[in-house]
Amino acid sequence: MAVKTEEHHLEKASTAIDASKLLGAFGKLLVYLALIIGAILFTAPWAWMLSASFQPLGDIFNWPPTWWPEHFTLENYRRVIRAAGIGQWYVNSMFIAISVVVLQLFFNSLAAYTFAKRRFPGRDAIFVFMLSTLMIPGVVFLIPNYIILQRIPLFGGNNILGMGGIGWLDSLWGLILPSAVSVWGIFFIRQYMKSIPDELLDAARIDGATEFRIYWQIALPLSGPALAATAISTFTWNWNDFFWPMLVISNPDLRTVQLGLALFVVQNRTVWDVVMSGSVLATLPVLIVFLIFQRYFIRGIALTGMK
Amino acid sequence: MTAIANSKPKNLFRRIDWRETLHLMKKNWSAYLFLSPWFILFLIFTVFSVSFSFYLSFHEWNIAESAKPFVGLENYIRLFKDEKFYQSLWNTLLFTGFGVPLGMASGLLVALLLNTKVRMQGIFRTLFYIPVITPLVVSSIIWKWLYQGDYGLLNYYLLKYGIIKEKLLWLADPNLAMPALIIMGIWAGTGGVMILYLAGLQGIPEELYDAAKVDGANGFQRLLFVTIPLLAPTTFYILITSVIGSFQSFAHIYIMTSGGPLRRTTVIGYYIYEAGFRHFEMGYASAMAYILFAFILMLTIIQMKFVKGDIQY
């Protein structure tokens, strides 16, 4: 399939310009030197956060800075868990991110299958209309969606006309449902599903399989890499999102990791030790997901990027 | 299933056969059912939302007040007289005009270096990409620390190597806050550009380099006359998407400078937030969002016009 070869190209330690022939051994040395300096500059901010998270507050302010902890301590982590309550934020963030991933995988792939493999009146019109909404910048949705959440009927003290209460504001619904489908996700999975041979599906149809069964038992298992790529980027995006939770959530018990951390910084400007360990913990899940699924991740970006 | 495909040759002006259409719709009822979960959410949070925003932009809409009068074009007229709006546009242009080209140059450089059969390509790629996946809140916190005037790491190393004479107050200095945000943006954006360029570089056929070699082109000439021109579609794609993204950025500005000092980092995205959620002028904020929408729409149309050509090697 198209995606497979794409990956192959990316993984192949590449081809185009051969440094050794190009500039000789000296040139190769320069290339490494440039890459190493660049990598140090790009990693330094991040490495410093990690180092500081294991240092007592006094040492963090050392001048010159100590890169390797002199007085190694886990106290910062103990404090961010106990005092700041990052545990609850973690539970909330995980619940939101995983719910969104599950809902998106199901809804997106169902729609993607329908767009890719079914013929029905209105299909192309709906598809083109859907794609055209990709042009709308996210910031346009900020205000209307806030008001829509507030007016969801029969939730958060609202009556059937959506008046009187706060609707889905200040609830996890308001964070999960607006992101439960994604046009990009549908488009991406649909492109992948297009390459499934029609004969395979028609054979199942002749055998009397229902459309849902064909989707569930044939199309879905064959779309693994596309599903993985969407799942990973959806998880990362939702875990990292800060702004929408900030607008929607005011109850401290419902804070996400990013929201909790940002508000903690605003309220306790000088507690850098706790802030640093909190930052490490806030990054950990996406970092782990990224390191494990790196190839899917990069392939997904390269593919959506080039389409 | 194949009814539509096999029916008469496609004719745009063919009269729609309503009975046939209805029949096909009935036959394929499950297709509509499959689309419905997506379609309902899409209707509410995208289609209705964007129309509602348009409606809002013609009203004085304060979430705390019950009267929400229709004001016609007043929000738009006010916008064109609002000095803060012009300032935010200017700031957005600065942020984008410097940030995007610099980020693209640095991403291209890394991609070209990585594309030279280096060892440990994967490790370098990962290290350059980590800033991209780092949560924005976390990178803002780290950079806020780096930019600290008294004990920040940046001042320490700049002083140590004699680049500056005295400590700089990066984020608190009206002239340095915007450059500081741009530098952080380059750090956060290089990895993404790098990945796209690496993908673009893989797409250039080896034969073209061989042909250039036969013609006697040296390494630098091959870079200039083969690689760079053939990367043009990639470059164009990255340019447009980065500009669109950059026009909208404001979350890290919210955390790092809150638009200050002296509104020097209030970009348009931040001003929309401020008007809508600080001053609760949701109609006015929607009008601004629509102006931004118009800009981005223009860029998207330009992009589609060019990409249609789909340059082939």
Image (cartoon, coloured by chain):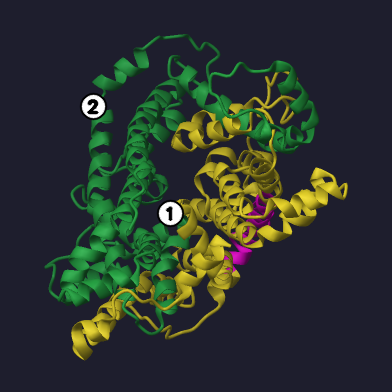
Residue that lies at the very extreme toward the front in this rendered image: B8
Q: Name the residue under label 1.
A: A306
Residue located 45% across and 14% down the image: B59
Q: Which mark is residue B48?
A: none
Q: Which chain carries label 2?
A: B
Q: Name the residue under label 2.
A: B83
Label 2 is placed on what type of residue? Glu
Tell me if I can see residue A281 in this picture: no
Give the magenta part as a residue range: A79-101
Given residues B304 and B73, the one toward you in this image is B304
Task: Give the letter of the yellow chain.
Answer: A
**Membership of A150 in magenta stretch:** no
Residue located 73% across and 60% down the image: A221
Tell me if I can see residue A197 in this picture: yes
CA gap, disc 1 and disc 2 = 39 Å
Q: Mark 1 lies on which chain?
A: A
